[in-house]
């Protein structure tokens, strides 16, 4: 591709990297072996940014393909936002999603998920503490160390609202990994694996 095509392609790549919170490294453009027939442009190109929402955005931007300004895409669904978006529900225990249970005595944390209301899941943990402590790593930790259970507002914290599904599984793994990095987790270590994306996001949050 020629210089103009290369710059346009590079700009699109930079936009994608920037919108997903990745560092952008400068790189040299390719050298042409032939002499260009047209003189280099003297005017600065104009760009218009569109938030990509699907095929509708593609249809609209095609109308600008051979016109000025040039088109760049932007998305609000970055990896960072998808994994760390906070809940906005007035009653924070009425939704479903990822939650954290904190031991009142040693303050170590257990991360879990539920597709039902947080209050329903809390009652299940409370019943397990009294009748079947081995049902979860959290209740097992409390009984083995003679720690107290505590009321829901004190020990339960909804982290992110989400419906049951693959995305909820990923959110749970991310928050478990966050506690694992801080050596503060009560989850089973057999289910924790190294993840480069999680590592990057954790480092960004702590710098």
Image (spheres, grey):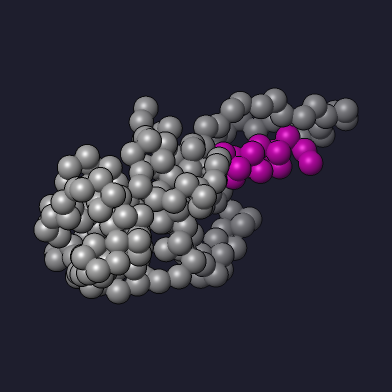
Which secondary structure is most common in the magenta stretch?
A: helix
> What quarter of the picture does the N terminus occupy?
top right
In the image, residue 14 above or below residue 144? above
**From the viewer's perspective, is 42 left or right of 54?**
right
For the point 64% across and 39% down, which residue is it?
10
Left or right: 11 with respect to 204? right
Question: Is 141 a magenta residue?
Answer: no
The location of residue 124, given as percent across then percent down, is 25, 70
Q: Position of residue 164 (x, y in %)?
A: 40, 71
Range of magenta residues:
1-17
Dividing the image into 4 quarters, which one contains the C terminus? top left
- Note whether residue 20 is visible: no
Q: Is residue 169 above or below residue 194?
A: below
Tell me if residue 7 is in the magenta stretch: yes
- Residue 138 in the image, given as x and y percentages of width and height: 30, 54
Q: Nearer the viewer, residue 148 or 87?
A: 148
Q: Give the farthest residue toward the right.
A: 34
Query: Where residue 86 sits: x, y (%)?
Result: 28, 54
Q: Between residue 122 and residue 80, name the one nearer to us.
A: 122
Q: Is residue 147 visible?
A: yes
Residue shown at 59% from the left, 45% from the top: 12
């Amino acid at each position: 591709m020629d210089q103009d095509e290369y710059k346009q392609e590079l700009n699109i790549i930079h936009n994608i990297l920037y919108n997903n919170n990745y560092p952008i490294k400068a790189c040299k453009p390719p050298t042409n072996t032939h002499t260009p027939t047209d003189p280099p442009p003297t005017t600065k190109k104009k760009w218009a940014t569109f938030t990509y929402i699907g095929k509708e955005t593609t249809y609209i931007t095609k109308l600008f393909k051979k016109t000025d300004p040039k088109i760049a895409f932007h998305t609000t669904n970055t990896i960072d936002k998808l994994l760390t978006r906070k809940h906005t529900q007035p009653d924070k225990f009425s939704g479903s999603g990822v939650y954290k249970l904190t031991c009142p005595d040693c303050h170590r944390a257990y991360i879990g998920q539920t597709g039902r209301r947080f209050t329903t899941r809390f009652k299940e943990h409370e019943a397990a503490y009294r009748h079947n402590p081995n049902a979860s790593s959290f209740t097992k930790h409390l009984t083995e160390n003679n720690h107290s259970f505590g009321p829901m507002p004190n020990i339960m914290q909804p982290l992110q609202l989400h419906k049951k599904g693959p995305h909820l599984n990923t959110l749970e793994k991310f928050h478990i990994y966050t506690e694992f990095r801080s050596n503060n987790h009560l989850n089973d270590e057999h289910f924790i694996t190294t993840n480069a994306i999680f590592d990057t996001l954790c480092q960004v949050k702590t710098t």
